Amino acid sequence: MYAIVDIETTGGHASAGCITEIAIYVHDGREIVEQYETLVNPGRPIPRYIQALTGITDEMVADAPYFDEVAHKVFELLQGQIFIAHNVNFDYSFLKHQLDGCGYTLQSKKLCTVRLSRKVFPGFPSYSLGNLCRQLGINIQQRHRAAGDALATVQVFERILTADTEGAIAQALHARSREKWLPLHLPQEQVADLPSCPGVYYFHNAKGKVVYVGKARDIKKRVTSHFTGNSAGRQRQEFLRNIHSISYEKTGTELMAFILESIEIRRLWPEYNNAQKRIEFKFGIYTFEDQQGYLRLAIEKRRKYTYPVFTFNLLTEGHQLLRDLVKAFKLCHKLCFLQTDHDACVGLAEKTCKGACEKKEKPHRYNKRVQAAILHLQASQPSFAIFDGGRTATEQSCILMEKGKFYGMGYLPRDVAVSDSTALKDMLTQYPENEFIRNLLRQYTGSKTARLVNL
């Protein structure tokens, strides 16, 4: 048995909207055997544009039952039936959300007449309910009202039942089929063709623009995980509605997928990626020249469009690093802001400061040691290459870190052994680096298959 449903609502998201009208036609595969329709008082004003679209006004629903008054009847009609609607996930998410709030747990198999029509009636310019009905010669009575649209969906489904010679309905109802969870506009074939390997995937909107970039150890498994569940939240529902196609790029390893994802997020700035659109490190060591001509080293909070000598997340880490530089290069505690009181510089007593804070040492002499400290800090950063599996059995992947900065990555023939960074650069693709990638590679400790080569 099938329950063919249409609802009208106060908005586009189940978690923030309410039902204003519902129609259910129970169908046995040959004819309608039971029907139910009612206006529903949403308990809030209906937006004017919704009133204009549906014709349902606040006055019309003022004496209508609230949803909790009809929830038992709705649940009774839906539970155990195959739930059918035009864009089924919209109607299902609303009804499941509202029924959950009344203590009823809806668990139904689903069929979407949009997806089924694309398979059974291929080649139509549009599969919206109005356009589809025009193509099939179905006359819709009371467009944008629940009963009118539900009855039109019944007629569409009856045409599908008659024309389904390839078993599209049976395939959609198969227990292992994930098609019912897919975004409305995303072709099932694109998901079926995804590879099960590490890489980066891209969700595109109707205009082809990338709206989300993700990384995965297994592209196919990760992509399909985005579409499980039936969250009623506004952001998730918008996200799913905006996915029209998927593209991907294979990488040799999950680590490379992490790196490429970070690069692509900053290159494309996708609408639904938020995590890496901020500065990762909270603090930095900065250098500037004061009015007396002395170079100063200072720890400050990170800000956009600033260029620190070194970055870190913990103040304790930065202070220890700066103390080490002060001691090694005989710098001044006060000029490095490690001492901020008005007492004599502790470096004078410890014989690490040569009196720059008291103008006893000329700026040019002191500045040479500051510059040497900066060069030492930069030069002490690691240079290494990570060799690991490639995209095929005949290649290996390589990631190059040079003096603490990510240079690039790429793929080499498996039998090539390179230990010189200059030679490696000719074989790799250089990418813009960022602090997320640097931190990722600093923390990298290798794996059972990876080979770390210091350069």
Image (cartoon, rainbow, N blue to C red):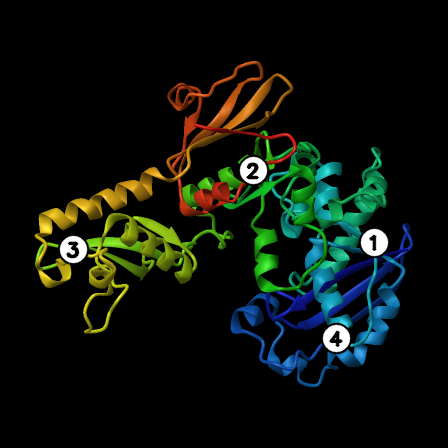
Are the two marked residues, 4 and 2, in contact with CB atoms closer than 8 angstroms?
no
Label located before the other in sequence (4 or 2)? 4
According to the image, label 1 marks what residue?
109
Q: Is residue 438 above or below residue 35?
A: above
According to the image, label 2 marks what residue?
255
Question: Residue at 42% across / 21% down in the picture?
Answer: 420
According to the image, label 3 marks what residue?
354
Q: Name which residue type carries label 3.
A: Lys
For disc 4, the neighbor class at 10 Å (few under 14, some 14 to 19, many from 20) is few
Determine the CA span between mark 2 and mark 3: 47 Å
* Camera-side mark, 4 or 1: 4
The picture places residue 73, in percent across and down from the top left corner, at 85, 73
* Camera-side mark, 2 or 1: 2
Label located before the other in sequence (2 or 3)? 2
The picture places residue 338, in percent across and down from the top left corner, at 28, 63
Q: Which mark is residue 125?
A: none
